[in-house]
Image (tube, rainbow, N blue to C red):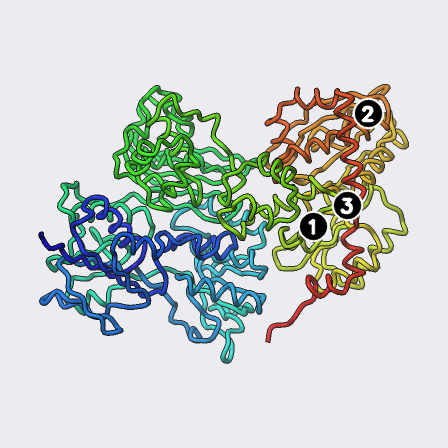
Amino acid sequence: MSQKEKLVVIGNGMAGVNTVEHILKLAPNQFDITIFGSEPHPNYNRILLSYVLAGDSKVDDIVINSYEWYEEHGISLYTGETITEINSETKIVTSDKGTTISYDKLIISTGSNAFMLPLPGADKEGVIAYRTIQDCEYMMEAAKNYKKAVVIGGGLLGLEAARGFLNLGMKVDVVHICDSIMERQLDRTASKMLQEKLESQGMNFLLNKQTEKILGKDRVKGLKFSDGSKVDADLVVMAVGISPNVQLAVDAGIEVKRGIVVNDFLETSVKDIFSVGECAEHRGIGYGLVAPLFEQGAVLAKKIAGVDTNPYEGSVVYTKLKVSGVDVFSGGEFIDGDNTKAIKIEDEFSGIYKKVLVRENKIIGAVLFGDTSDGTRLMQMIRNETDITGYEKAAILKDPDENSGKGSSVADMSDDEIICGCNGVSKGTICSVIKEQGLTSVEEVKNCTTASRSCGGCKSLVSDLLEYTIGDEFDKSAQKETMCECTDLEKEEIVVQIKEKGLSHVREVMSVLDWKNEEGCSKCRPAINYYLGMVNPKQYQDDSTSRFVNERMHANIQKDGTYSVVPRMYGGVTNPADLKKIATVAEKYNVPKVKITGGQRIDLLGVKKEDLTNMWEELDMPSGYAYGKAVRTVKTCVGEEFCRFGTADSMGMGIQIEKRFERLNTPAKVKMAVSGCPRNCAESGIKDLGVVAIDGGWELYAGGNGGVKLRKGDLVATVKTEAEVIEYTEAYLQYYRETGVYGERTSEWVERLGVQHIQDILADEAKREELCGRMDTALSVLKDPWKEAVKSEKIQKDLYEVIEAK
């Protein structure tokens, strides 16, 4: 019996272990494998730390290979143990704990270290990097006691860290030395759009700032910049780059430049020693993104296993920002040059920007903002150097196969090419699993391979691979849209289970329905909370911890950490007494800005958290729900009472509607309007429900939207009386509450269900009566949250008390 070769891997990160995974498939019995890792964890997906920090995942969720996996494959794993010496003469490595292991082949995959700026004060408590699980846990713990974070670095990692701090309830400033963020991945247009989007989420940017020193005695108190300005900080995170971890190789006499120098087969200058990942330098380039590391690993595995392989000739890199609600993609070259031409789409209404850069009729790069669905396909065209001669240039940003009749892009990919960059899953792996296990859906592929488990950007490619592999057996239209990554269930299935099983609280739903992530995430927890309240309005106790911060605080948090207060003003109508009261309160609490909103309300901006409840008490007005997934405003024109053209009492009708439905929770925010004549001065045509007076009656328009996705409402009913307006509105809103997906605006809902269907529902008297009955029940239990907070010392202490950091 021949003896196995000894393979030792220094580094338990993504690159090294991914290489081992390939080796196990290529030559499962060829090696005795030993892996050393400095961190006290099994192999985990470092790029998903952002989701952990953002509260969307737990540490366990990002573990790629559990301890059981190592045991199952006979791998000796040493965690929390660092190799300190390589003796290439005797072929022995030694750890900091005195362990010595001999090897026949050695892989160095020590990754990289977070770069810490050598600033005065960088050694103070509260100044950290963002690189490991320990860093992540430190930041999460710090957020419990401190309220102001500063992130140095406006690149990918810095922005993801900053978003995480916002989720943790901290104020955050992002300090960047350049005048635009993510300047290494985005052109100025995309960078500016991204900055504006992140500012709207509460992030504050300090651009063109060079940090001079970190302030504070023992613990950080702030930063001072070279222009003399300062900013306060309880916590400083440096996210300014990484440096390859090469000291071990240097000490072993291996050729090192910036990284460990490797050839096209990942061989170092010393025989039988290889290097892969961020610590390696190939053709003068060190890669800090995950997809190139997996491409290297596939080549290295074949080399070590003795399988013929093409050389690794470098990677075309791409980037996706992992921030909730922000879609950004960048791949290849992105700066216009003299020898390049660009195809661009810029839609300011929809917040979409797409640019494809072309040189010599080949796509060499792309930047996408707002809609990144084309990213993977364009990236494939970049890698393949696809000649676009003959393509209609304006249609490049659509699937070229639809325009040119050319072959499927996935069919042209090699088996080694990475489909899921987040989790390093190749086309070959996906196709094999589909065939071997008879998979027929994207969800099944995700569960078996982890492809599309993270950002989801590759779902369309996985879908294409299913179609490519099993042909007509794959039904794209039958693919499930699950609520989130925590479950395989769709919204309708969850609601049915809540009803049938009598589930009564969020954790019970997740437990009974076998949630993969027992804590849930920011997508499913608010949705479950809503569905429970919708199904059982009288019995259900709202779970405020499953609501987003604005809804939990019953006020909109602003970018500077202050809040805005918007008292309800039915139909946009007020009186001198209320105006005086608002003015008095605004003066007393030094409200810095008073603004009229687009919904005819008065917005008091810049209110301190600790002043909220006192202001609400002194205003003694209902909450305007300017923060909630709920009925917000009913805008009105002056109507027949004052207007020469008005044919009906629009103000009175608007007040009736708003009083009837105030505080009603809905899948997404609902804005309504009532116009006193077809001149439509209240803009009823672009509201979730628009009511327009006509001769002898009223028209009801559904699914309008004046936001980023502009949509004109559809006429769904014409009625004669004000009572009928209320009745049809009750039925319409209740049907939306019951059939809308949480987060889905009526504009999307109407298009999904079809206008005719909604018209039919509203026209059906029996259905209308049933819906109105359930609406009565839902409305009967609603209370004003401001009054509850004013009355409850516990609510005030839990939510609004401010404890100064020591």
Q: Please give the residue where the numbered disc 3 appears in the rendered image.
A: 601
Q: CA distance from mark 3 to mark 2?
A: 23 Å
Q: Please give the residue where the numbered disc 2 appears in the rendered image.
A: 693
Q: Quadrant of residue 274?
A: bottom left
Q: In this rendering, which labeled residue sits more in front, label 1 or label 2?
A: 1
Identified by mark 2, the residue type is Ala
Q: Is residue 334 visible to the viewer in this orientation of the structure? A: no
For the point 15% across and 61% down, which residue is it?
Answer: 103
Q: Position of residue 166 (x, y in %)?
A: 56, 57
Q: Please give the residue where the numbered disc 1 appears in the rendered image.
A: 542
Q: Along the polypeptide, which appears first: circle 3 or circle 2?
A: 3
Pointer 1 and pointer 2: residues touching (CB < 8 Å)?
A: no
Pointer 3 and pointer 2: residues touching (CB < 8 Å)?
A: no
Name the one closer to the observer, 672 or 332: 672
Q: Is residue 35 visible to the viewer in this orientation of the structure? A: yes
Question: For the residue labelled by badge 1, is the local secondary structure a helix, a strand or a loop?
Answer: loop
Q: In this rendering, which labeled residue sits more in front, label 3 or label 1?
A: 1
Question: For the residue labelled by badge 3, is the local secondary structure a helix, a strand or a loop?
Answer: loop
For the point 36% across and 51% down, which residue is it?
Answer: 64
